[in-house]
């Protein structure tokens, strides 16, 4: 119910672009939102080949010819597109207040879901912890401002499709019924996103 209220407030707010609707957008997920993190990893799952990026000034890394869904959402919110975490230096990360994208293609909710090297959901959450504990305090100066910033920000997850891929997780999926596997994935993602 809280999610419905927040979604309603965001979706029906005035998005004139004059000011951001929220302070930041933090993105977690797979290739549907990877903005280039995989370009820094040893994997075939990189959005670096033509036609990727042709409608976005030839920016490489997204698994699309232009913006991905998180980029469109950021634009709607009046925010810049969240940059890929792995593209940023420590200094750059400590200056960003509008969000970061931790997404990584070919990953899933389960740590075993991967094709080559990728940022598992657990690793993405660890990187967000660095943002929360180390980088945002430098950018916002006080813990009170960090808490307010995080409370008003949006956390966007687009992950789970790769967990169902038979060539990636056949040994795991065969141990569950279809609804049992879905419940297993929900249990796993809940462990990662549970507020402490």
Image: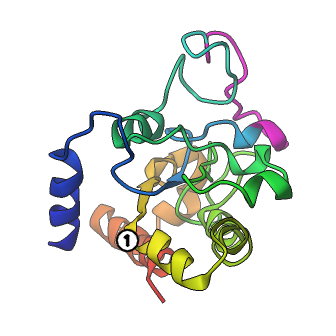
Furthest residue toward bottom: 196
From the viewer's perspective, tell me whether residue 53 is left or right of residue 176.
Answer: right
Dot 1 lies on which element? Answer: helix
Q: Quadrant of the N terminus?
A: bottom left
Counting other residues with Cα less than 10 Å from the Cα at mark 1, is it few (<14), some (14-19), or many (20 or more)?
few
Which is the main secondary structure of the residues drawn in magenta? loop
Residue sitting at 38 percent across and 55 percent down? 22
The x, y position of residue 13, in whole percent, is: 19, 47
Residue sitting at 56 percent across and 76 percent down? 146
Is 44 a magenta residue?
A: yes
Residue 24 in view:
yes
59 up-or-down from 133: above or below:
above
Residue 117 in view:
no
The x, y position of residue 94, in whole percent, is: 74, 61
76 up-or-down from 185: above or below:
above
The x, y position of residue 138, in whole percent, is: 73, 70
Is 95 a magenta residue?
A: no
- Give the quadrant of residue 136: bottom right
Residue sitting at 59 percent across and 57 percent down? 97
Q: Which residues are magenta?
A: 39-53
168 up-or-down from 15: above or below:
below
Circle count: 1
Q: On the image, numbered disc 1 is attached to which residue? A: 186
Q: Nearer the viewer, residue 196 or 17?
A: 17
The x, y position of residue 153, in whole percent, is: 42, 63
């Amino acid at each position: 119910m809280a999610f419905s209220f927040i979604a309603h407030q965001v979706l029906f707010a005035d998005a004139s672009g004059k000011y951001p609707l929220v302070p930041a957008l933090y993105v977690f997920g797979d290739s549907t939102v990877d903005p280039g993190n995989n370009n820094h990893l040893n994997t075939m799952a990189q959005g670096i080949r033509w036609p990727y990026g042709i409608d976005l000034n030839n920016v490489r890394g997204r698994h699309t010819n232009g913006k991905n869904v998180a980029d469109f959402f950021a634009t709607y919110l009046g925010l810049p597109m969240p940059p890929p975490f792995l593209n940023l230096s420590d200094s750059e990360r400590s200056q960003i207040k509008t969000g970061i994208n931790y997404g990584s293609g070919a990953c899933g909710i389960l740590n075993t879901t991967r094709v080559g090297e990728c940022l598992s959901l657990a690793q993405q959450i660890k990187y967000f912890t660095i943002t929360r504990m180390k980088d945002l305090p430098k950018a916002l100066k006080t813990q009170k401002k960090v808490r307010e910033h995080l409370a008003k920000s949006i956390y966007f997850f687009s992950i789970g499709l790769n967990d169902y891929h038979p060539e990636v997780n056949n040994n795991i999926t065969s141990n569950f019924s279809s609804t049992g596997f879905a419940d297993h994935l929900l249990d796993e993602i809940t462990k990662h996103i549970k507020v402490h």
